[in-house]
Image (spheres, rainbow, N blue to C red):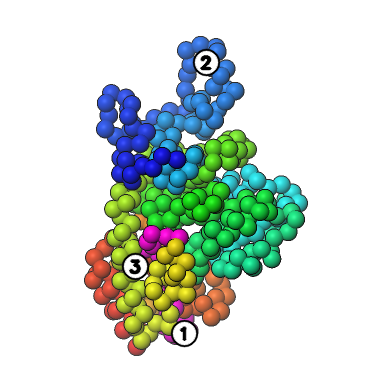
Amino acid sequence: MEKKYITEILHHLGEDDLPCGAVNPPIFQTSIFSFKGFDEFSTALSDETNHFLYTRGNNPTVNILEEKLAALEHAERAKLFGSGVAAIVSSISAFLKSGDHIVTVKDCYSWTSTYVTQYLARFGVEHTYVEGNDVNEIEAALKPNTKIIYLESPTTFTFKLQDLTEVSSLAKMRGVKTIIDNTWATPIYQNPIDFGIDLVVHSASKYLGGNSDVVGGVVAGSDEDVRRIFEKEFLNTGAVPDPFAAWLILRGIRTLHIRMPVHFQNAMELSRRLQKSEAVESVLYPMLESSEQYALAKKQMRGGSGLFSFKLKTRDIDRIKKFVNSLRFFRRAVSWGGYESLISPYAVSHRDPGDNVSLIRIHAGLEEIEVLSEDLDRAMKELG
């Protein structure tokens, strides 16, 4: 593929012929498209992949965003979905049937796990979970009926990496499709297709949107694979993104290359300061020099996002609650990737957290670093 500069993609790609000389793409808030004659109508009906017929398939606003997202991920094609879950589910379902088997990393997005464990099982699809940081473990999990290796690098709460080159090489030898959730690193810092991965999915609700005001998802890959997903899953399930939602994501990615370095810088500074705290047992962030997978992180990624975890030394849930409730600038909420800083304790979403009762995930937003650091310090003092 022809190499394009990031600003060329974000600010110009797909926008050469906007109506009326508009600087910003218009929102084509229309449900259907009409045709001048019978033949044109018939052609669109027979090939909805490449024509505007009904916005539940293609839409001009959506397609401009898709062209940019494909270029960002070094892919031939991309398809926008109404949510990240829809993109994940469709990309997996398109390549599975009853009797097949999928290998997936254990610490993945919770709804991915739910889909694999509960939903697919209803239709006779087997699954095996792996830690993912050892390619030999992944190879041992493969079966003759394995069709997909599903990756998330780094993983959701513990931020473990998979060696994308090794996994993709193994998968190609076995004829297995590889799919990765690249939401954490974004295309600014990691391009899995360059390492041989087949398909890349994102929750566009997070860094791509960047403002915590839109829900969306995307899958990017070869023209053949994305067309298959579009025709087999997207059109049949109606996981359509609204044109206005696409426009919001389009607006969000204009500043992606500006926002991500700030998230990265803030996360690095906070994680280093937390490492020095007497109340903290460990910090989980792959871009830290002390990380066990630091060499792999530097090999695969050009930087990191604002999301990381740390574990407090205490296992007293009441003290942990006190710490969480003492924070002023870290909002207690799910998701991440917006401008704001967030905190999500493992114990909130897990009834039996075990030793992970003190595991806390942080999203470092775009606030001044001293504001965030002082907030954490103040809450640490509440621990006593």
SS at mark 3 in the image = helix
In the image: residue 228, left or right of residue 255: right
- Disc number placed over residue 99 in the picture, else none: none
The tally of labels here is: 3
Tag 3 near tag 2, CB within 8 Å: no
Range covered by the magenta-colored residues: 300-320
Mark 1 vs mark 3: give the one in front.
3
In the image: residue 374, left or right of residue 63: left
Q: Amino acid at mark 2?
A: Glu
In the image: residue 213, left or right of residue 175: left
Magenta stretch holds residue 314: yes
- Disc number placed over residue 267 in the picture, else none: 3
Quadrant in the picture for residue 168: bottom right
The answer to whether residue 109 shows anywhere in this view is no
- Of 303 and 53, nearer the camera is 303
The answer to whether residue 373 shows anywhere in this view is yes
Task: Determine which residue is flagged by label 1.
Answer: 316
Residue at image point 26% right, 32% down: 23
Residue at image point 59% right, 68% down: 134
SS at mark 2 in the image = helix
Spatial CA span between label 1 and label 2: 68 Å
Q: Amino acid at mark 3?
A: Ala
Mark 1 vs mark 2: give the one in front.
2
Spatial CA span between label 3 and label 2: 53 Å
Q: Reply above or below: 197 against 345.
A: above
Mark 3 residue crowding within 10 angstroms, few (<14) / some (14–19) / many (20+): many
Sequence-wise, which precedes: disc 1 or disc 3? 3
Sequence-wise, which precedes: disc 1 or disc 2? 2
Residue at image point 55% right, 13% down: 39
Task: Determine which residue is flagged by label 2.
Answer: 40
